[in-house]
Amino acid sequence: MMCSIGGGVWVLGWLYWLCLSNFAANLTFRIKKEYLEAILKQECAWFDQINYTELSAKIARETATINKGYSEKAGNVSLAIGTFLSGIAVGFWMGWKLALAMMVLVPFVGVLGYMFEKMMSSSTSAQLRFYSQSAGYAEQALIAIRVVVAFGMEQVEAHNYMKHLGRAKKNSLKTHFCNAIMLGLMFVMIYCMYAYAFWAASIFVERQIENEGRNRPYQGGDSIGVFFAVLIGLFSISMISNQATAIV
């Protein structure tokens, strides 16, 4: 039975991601084409107000974000919602009293997941901004390399490039430090949830509390089933905020 379920999940999952990837690829192709056409229709004065050397990288970056949002992110949101609903349903079916006792963990899981996803999103955006600026300086210098060499501006351009790379490095170190702290806090919270869940389950089993869904007192198997079903559902829904933001 488990092998059959695993094979069905593999086939359906492959079809699910295949459809999402094809849809996102076609959408990205159309958007990239219309994006470039809109840029080429602008007046010459518009190009004087921006750094036109970053346009190609900007088109590729933004269309890649759209592609990722409508393929990977949309799929993750759908899977998270489905996992949450099915996990809670299975948990309440196996033992609604214990599942209800574990639902007090919802605020903690939601706040922790939101903080982690928010930090990851902001740090990634900052890194992309710094790298885009450094790439623009480098590309502009290479395009006008004859002028740079003629006026002896090699060191100046290299300094400008390294300045933005230094900002990116500093932001990256800060980001990894904060992510390490958040990851540690997440594992602390996970193990605290494990401790609470097994402590509550031991009370249900020890006091022989009636499990109306099974018409018998709670047993160890009921506790494990409810524990994993509810906890997996809660953690899946806690990671949905950043995914939904990318889609919007």
Image (spheres, rainbow, N blue to C red):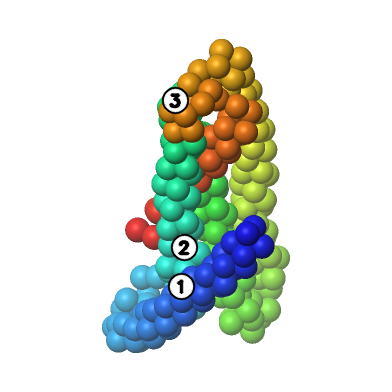
Three-letter residue code for mark 3: Lys
Return the disc, 3 or 2, that comes first in the chain's sequence: 2
Q: Between tags 1 and 3, which lies in front?
A: 3
Which residue is at 46% across, 72% downward? 20
Circle 2 SS class: helix
127 or 78, which is in the foreground?
78
Please give left or right for residue 29 compared with residue 42 in the image. Answer: right
What is the distance, in whole Å, between disc 2 and disc 1 at their CAs? 7 Å
Can residue 94 be seen here? The reply is: yes
Q: Residues within 10 Å of mark 1 (few under 14, many from 20)?
A: some
Circle 1 SS class: helix
- Quadrant into which the C terminus falls: bottom left
Return the disc, 1 or 3, that comes first in the chain's sequence: 1
Disc 2 marks which residue?
75
Q: Residues within 10 Å of mark 3 (few under 14, many from 20)?
A: some
Q: Which x, y percent locates residue 120?
A: 55, 47
Circle 3 SS class: helix
Q: Which x, y percent locates residue 171?
A: 61, 46
